[in-house]
Amino acid sequence: MLGPIVNSACIVFGALTGSLCGRIISPEFNKKIILVFSCITMGIGVSMTAKGNSLPPVVIALLLGTLMGEACRIEAGAMRLAFRVVGFFRRGKTAAALPEQAFRDQFAVLTVLFCVSGLGIMGSMNEGMTGDPSLLLIKSLLDLPTALLFAANIGGVVAVLVVPQFLIQAAILLLATSVAPLTTPAMFADFSACGGIIMLGAALRQFGLAPVPVISMIPALFLVMPISAFWVRLLA
């Protein structure tokens, strides 16, 4: 389980360093770099979406998953937890002055990037099936500066995301051996497309173009593979 552990350590180190050094990083530089990360997120999302096998299962999973997420108020619960935890961290002047909606948007984007990004999920599956942690190590190198820059803006509360990040990656890694024989290339392709659309939503939200409910869309990742399998059998 080397990959999830290294990934968690990089996020914590980046979050704590960013919260302590937030005053050193100018708001203008921080904003520009975060926009660059948003462009990268959008590019990854487009690449993942293009790998989809069939669009209907992805659409159905996203609609049902988002309805479930909104009904369970996943995003509202995550934000309540974030604001409760934020009191335990020192926040710089920039973070303290950050509007609540901007905080919510950036925290939601980070939740997707750290916890349910395609690279993290695929890396966990790859390590579980082959023992090779290389994909998660690459993700760790990307997450460290991301956590640092976002923590300089919204505070050390970024570090709390290591809890769901580690639990999700560890669970996928442990289940990969038993799940892998049940998956097909079509199912995995639709899973990639679903994750890509969620990452596109995260990028749009970070750009400030639309308040996409990205955290509420996360249940779709658990629905898309079964729906994809059913769809293939329906057309067979």
Image (cartoon, helix red, strand yellow):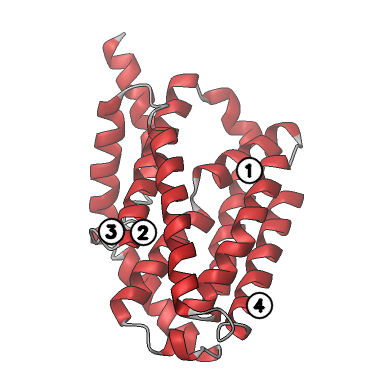
Using the image as rendered, state which of residue 67 and residue 29 is in the foreground.
29
Residue 224, picture quadrant:
top left
The earlier-in-sequence mark between 3 and 1 is: 1
Q: Position of residue 30 (x, y in %)?
A: 49, 71
The earlier-in-sequence mark between 4 and 1 is: 4
Q: Does residue 37 appear in the picture of this structure?
A: yes
Give the side of residue 223 with respect to residue 15, left or right.
left
The residue labelled by disc 2 is 215
Whether label 3 touches label 2, CB < 8 Å: yes
Give the side of residue 70 with respect to residue 229, left or right.
left
Amino acid type, residue under disc 3 in the picture: Pro
Label 2, label 1: how many angstroms apart (C-alpha)? 20 Å
SS assignment at label 4:
helix
Whether label 4 touches label 3, CB < 8 Å: no
Question: How many residues crowd around disc 2 within 10 Å: few (fewer than 14), some, or many (20 or more)?
Answer: many
Label 4, label 1: how many angstroms apart (C-alpha)? 26 Å
Q: Does residue 1 appear in the picture of this structure?
A: no
The residue labelled by disc 4 is 17
Whether label 2 touches label 1, CB < 8 Å: no
The residue labelled by disc 1 is 124
Please identify the residue farthest to the top as the structure is shown: 236
Q: Is residue 28 above or below residue 44?
A: below
Instruction: Identify the image quadrant of the C terminus.
Output: top left
